[in-house]
Image (tube, rainbow, N blue to C red):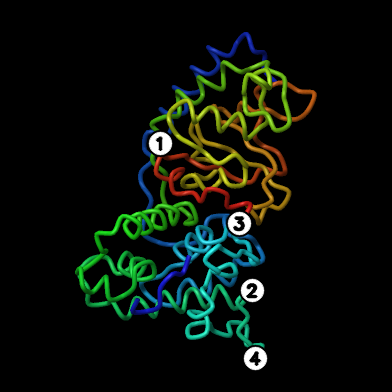
């Protein structure tokens, strides 16, 4: 929220051996995967198709900003909802307070008006405001992007006064959250580090093989321990201490996105009705290796192994603790 002005099917019985071979084999094959590089581009479909070109263009407005960072900020602010309105009267996709919009909003699409509710204006305005803040704090020690975000949250004066990100819990958390989410919106240029919790998450899902599917199921006793697709993946990662969102298209943002040939056991794999838009994701499973996942497919089925290669395969996420913690509470309902 902008609070301040510039200054202010495989049989269940074979599962143990099957999982073991896949996990060992896939990890061995992926031993050379490293960390991400420095080149920034948007991950496939991470930004809704309607806004991708605008975010890509305006995300390169100044050196302190990049498209993935701008995308992370917009997602954190509104979950891509152009009609979002907060209790503090922050408005639109970029969540500008009207007073701040009056002085810092821009006519991004050149139609002669600055509309706080129009993403074609709100996205460029967010980028423009970020870059303006970056100029104010350009001589402050520390990472310019961190100082820019801190100025956005606490005001430029506070950043200058403290010689960097101020010692305010809210501001420090804001900077960390956005920089972590940035990784989810950036396309990796190399490999993605393996998850440390993957084997245990797979083990949990493996124990649920054969359980009947339940729409809306999260595994509660009242539901007979049954799951739908995202309920299963949420529970699998909750078993290792990682809290994922309830909805599949929000789970997509819980970490970086390995390519198809970089998949490792434990990655979440997603399927979408629109291969250019993560918000159209309709299904998720837990990858186990060898081209297979454990998933809860649909009403009338059971939790089982399925192949991941299908026309609606969208991509994957390597879940991390920090990535999951950085997600907004209810981005789909923003």
Which mark identifies residue 194? 1
Q: Earlier in the sequence, mark 2 or mark 4?
A: 4
* Residue under numbered circle 3: 334
The reply to whether the C-beta atoms of the residues labelled 3 and 4 are less than 8 Å apart is: no
> What distance separates the C-alpha of mark 3 from that of mark 4?
28 Å
Which mark identifies residue 311? none
* Residue under numbered circle 2: 117
Q: Quadrant of the C terminus?
A: bottom right
Image coordinates of residue 235 in percent, x first then y, are 55, 28
Please tell me which residue is depicted at 48% across the width and 83% down the height of the picture: 104
Q: Relative to residue 111, is residue 177 drawn left or right?
A: left
List the single residue furthest toward the bottom.
112
SS at badge 1: loop
Image coordinates of residue 1 in percent, x first then y, are 48, 65
Seen in the picture, residue 102 relative to 157 is either above or below; the reply is below
Image coordinates of residue 179 in percent, x first then y, are 38, 57
List the single residue furthest toward the front.
87
Judging depth in this view, the residue of 109 and 187 nearest the camera is 109
Which mark identifies residue 112? 4
């Amino acid at each position: 929220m902008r609070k301040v002005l510039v200054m202010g099917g495989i049989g269940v019985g074979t599962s143990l051996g099957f999982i073991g071979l896949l996990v060992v084999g896939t990890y061995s094959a992926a031993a050379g995967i490293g960390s991400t590089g420095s080149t920034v581009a948007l991950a496939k479909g991470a930004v809704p198709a309607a806004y991708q070109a605008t975010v890509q263009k305006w995300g390169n407005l100044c050196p302190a900003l990049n498209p993935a960072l701008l995308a992370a900020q917009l997602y954190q602010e509104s979950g891509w909802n152009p009609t979002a309105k907060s209790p503090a009267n922050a408005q639109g996709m970029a969540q500008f307070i009207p007073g701040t919009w009056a002085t810092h909003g821009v006519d991004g699409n050149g139609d002669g008006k600055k509309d706080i509710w129009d993403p074609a204006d709100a996205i460029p305005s967010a980028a423009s405001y970020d870059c303006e803040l970056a100029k104010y704090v350009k001589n402050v020690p520390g990472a310019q992007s961190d100082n820019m975000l801190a100025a956005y949250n606490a005001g430029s004066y506070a950043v200058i006064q403290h010689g960097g990100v101020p010692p305010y819990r809210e501001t420090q958390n804001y900077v960390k959250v956005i920089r972590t989410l940035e990784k989810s919106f950036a396309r990796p240029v190399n490999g993605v580090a393996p998850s440390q919790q993957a084997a245990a998450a797979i083990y949990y899902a493996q124990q649920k093989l054969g359980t009947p599917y339940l729409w809306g199921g999260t595994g509660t006793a009242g539901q007979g321990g049954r799951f739908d697709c995202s309920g299963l993946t949420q529970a699998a990662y909750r078993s290792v201490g990682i809290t994922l969102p309830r909805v599949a298209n929000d789970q997509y943002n819980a970490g970086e996105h390995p390519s198809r040939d970089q998949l490792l056991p434990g990655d979440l794999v997603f399927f979408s009705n629109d291969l250019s838009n993560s918000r159209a994701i309709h299904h998720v499973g837990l990858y186990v290796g060898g081209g297979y996942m454990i998933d809860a497919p649909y009403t009338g089925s059971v939790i089982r192994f399925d192949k991941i290669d299908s026309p609606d395969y969208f991509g994957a996420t390597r879940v991390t603790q920090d990535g999951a913690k950085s997600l907004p509470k209810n981005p789909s309902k923003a």
